[in-house]
Image (tube, rainbow, N blue to C red):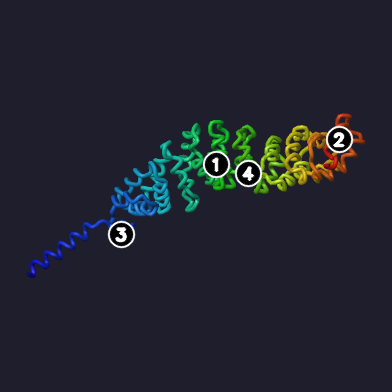
Amino acid sequence: MHKRLVVAAGSLILMGAHCKPTTIAEAEARGDVAWLQQNDTPSASAALGRLADGNPKAAAALTLRSSYDLEAFRAAWAAVGRGAPWGATMMHDALGDPKRADHAAAAMTRAGGQLPAFVPDLEGALIRLSATPQSANVSSALASVGPPAREAVERRLVDASTRASMCVGIASPQADDDAHKALVGVPPLARDAITCVDAVVHIAASDEASLAWLAARAEPGLLGAAGKSPAMPCARLHVAWVQAFGARPATDYPAMTVPLGYAVTRCAPQMDGVLADAIVRLPASHAIVVAAIDPFASYGDGLRATCAALPAIAGGRDTPIVRERASDALLHACKAPG
């Protein structure tokens, strides 16, 4: 009888040992890689990542999973933060693989200060992916590194094949201020892409230093883009043009005509004081001020101060063409609606 009890107890122990885990914590405690691999959840991937620090099978499972699951890269990036070699190996390898590089970059954050070590990988990935739309996360990660990536960011801006992609990253919320400085510091040709124009406008919409650069030193075409874009608040556009008239020489005025027109068309009430002040204080601006006003457009009461100042041009000493344009504005654009 005693022997039968011992055998029965042993059988129960063996049955318990072969029961499958019922929770991720239990599977991790047992080191059950197969169970965690089948449990397709973020928590399972994180558990596999922790096991991978000492279990090559778990690292292999995550590498296999990385072909379709972003969570595998999050687990690998967490391992990089812990100093686990398998994590860095997996991230370096993935960034070298065009099919996985952008997903890998999506998991890379600035927390922990690990990004600088991956700058060469990110730059190489951006070069390889430049002809595809699958590079936004790579360029965003590169733009988020900060000063250690400045030279790489500038190289990608100067290179026409990667310029547009790099500017997508610079415009992203993750981008570091140093990437913004790189964008405004490169030669104008290195900003010659629509995504770069968009990046300048979006950054200047909230950053004071970028707005001051846009107003005083940027290509006039960028001022024009800011005037047209709803991403630039009209109040910020007012500030930009106050600074532009205060900082730019009169020789720049002809190139500012069209940009000023865009600003007036979209933001007449906010631009009213700018135009009126220019009429009074900057005689050299009269030509572009009247050219920016569409004489047959309806501004409502948006240009009240400007219309009050225009007679000084219409009856002044400007050229006949400028005086005629001012008169047209007074007769039509300044006419009270209704």
For the C terminus, give its image quadrant.
top right
Spot occupied by residue 61 in the image (x, y as percentages of width and height): 32, 46
Instruction: Return the disc, 1 or 2, that comes first in the chain's sequence.
Output: 1
User: Measured from the top left, where is residue 55 in percent x and y?
Assistant: 30, 51
Mark 3 lies on a secondary structure that is helix
- Check disc 3 and give the amino acid type: Glu
> Mark 3 or mark 1: which comes first in sequence?
3
* Residue labelled with disc 4: 202
Few, some or many residues within 10 Å of mark 2 (<14, 14–19, 20+): many
Residue underneath mark 1: 169
- How far is disc 2 from disc 3 in space, using C-alphas? 81 Å
Mark 1 and mark 4: span between their CA atoms? Answer: 12 Å
Q: Mark 2 points at which residue?
A: 326
Quick one: 217 or 291, which is closer to the camera? 291
Q: Camera-side residue: 322 or 251? A: 322
Left or right: residue 244 compared with residue 209: right
Q: Nearer the viewer, mark 4 or mark 2?
A: 2
Q: Distance between the residues labelled 4 and 2?
A: 34 Å
Say if mark 2 contacts mark 3, CB within 8 Å.
no
Identify the residue position indicated by label 3 in the image.
Answer: 26
Amino acid under disc 4: His
